[in-house]
Each structure stands twice: as structure tokens, then as C-alpha cells.
Image (tube, rainbow, N blue to C red):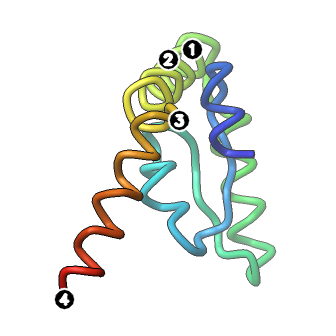
Amino acid sequence: VIAEAFAVGRPVLAARVADHAVLVSEGVRGFLFDPEDPASIATAIARLQGLGHPDRLVMGAAARAFAEAELDMERCADRYEQLFAEVTAR
């Protein structure tokens, strides 16, 4: 879902789990929250809601640029191939 939001130029709110912090980059392409802390969730929502239109556009453009540069299918396939090569070479 994060990749899909980025692809259409939308910043996201995401739980601070798995690799979401790498994707979202706090304050750059969205905001992160602790999924077990309601105050953290509310703060992330308030931060996104509090952005002015120009700031939302900048954040959305950063999300789109990241998606285009890092999340296209060919690049992801190349990274998996590289990872498999490294693992099997051990």
C-alpha cells in the first residue's frame, strides 16, 4: 500500500514496523507511528493534517520520486537477484 500511495504522489502514515521507516523516511514521504500507542497514531495524523497544501505537495512529490527511482519492478528484481547471488555465494 505504501508503494501504491507513493506511485500516485501521496505521503503516507505508516506503523513503525518492518522496513516502513526506510520507505517513509520520517517527515520526508510521510509520518511514522507506534502501532501500539494511540497517542503516537494521533500525533502522526495531526502532523499530516497540519501540513499546508504546498508542504503536502512537496512530500507527495518526494514520495513519487522515490517510487520511480527505487520501487520499479526491474530495480526490485535486480535487487532480489543480487541478494540471492550473495546468499548462495556464502
Q: Position of residue 88 (x, y in %)?
A: 28, 81
| Nearest-to-viewer mark from 4 and 1 | 4
Q: Which class describes the residues within 10 Å of circle 1: few (<14), some (14-19), or many (20+)?
A: some
Q: Earlier in the sequence, mark 2 or mark 3?
A: 2
Q: Which class describes the residues within 10 Å of circle 2: few (<14), some (14-19), or many (20+)?
A: many
Residue wearing tag 4:
90
| Nearest-to-viewer mark from 4 and 2 | 4
Q: Position of residue 14 (x, y in %)?
A: 67, 57
Q: Earlier in the sequence, mark 4 or mark 3?
A: 3
Find the distance from the CA under tag 4 to the CA under tag 3. 26 Å
Find the distance from the CA under tag 3 to the CA under tag 1. 25 Å
Amino acid residing under circle 1 = Leu
Find the distance from the CA under tag 1 to the CA under tag 2. 6 Å
Amino acid residing under circle 3 = Met
Find the distance from the CA under tag 2 to the CA under tag 3. 20 Å
- Assign the C terminus to one quadrant of the image: bottom left
Q: Residue at x 52, y 22 (%)?
A: 64
Q: Position of residue 16 (x, y in %)?
A: 59, 70
Q: Is residue 79 left or right of residue 34?
A: left
Residue wearing tag 1:
57
Q: Are marks 1 and 2 in contact (CB under 8 Å)?
A: yes
Amino acid residing under circle 4 = Arg
As helix, strand or loop, the secondary structure at mark 4 comes to loop
| Nearest-to-viewer mark from 4 and 3 | 4
As helix, strand or loop, the secondary structure at mark 3 comes to helix
Residue wearing tag 3:
73
Residue wearing tag 2:
61
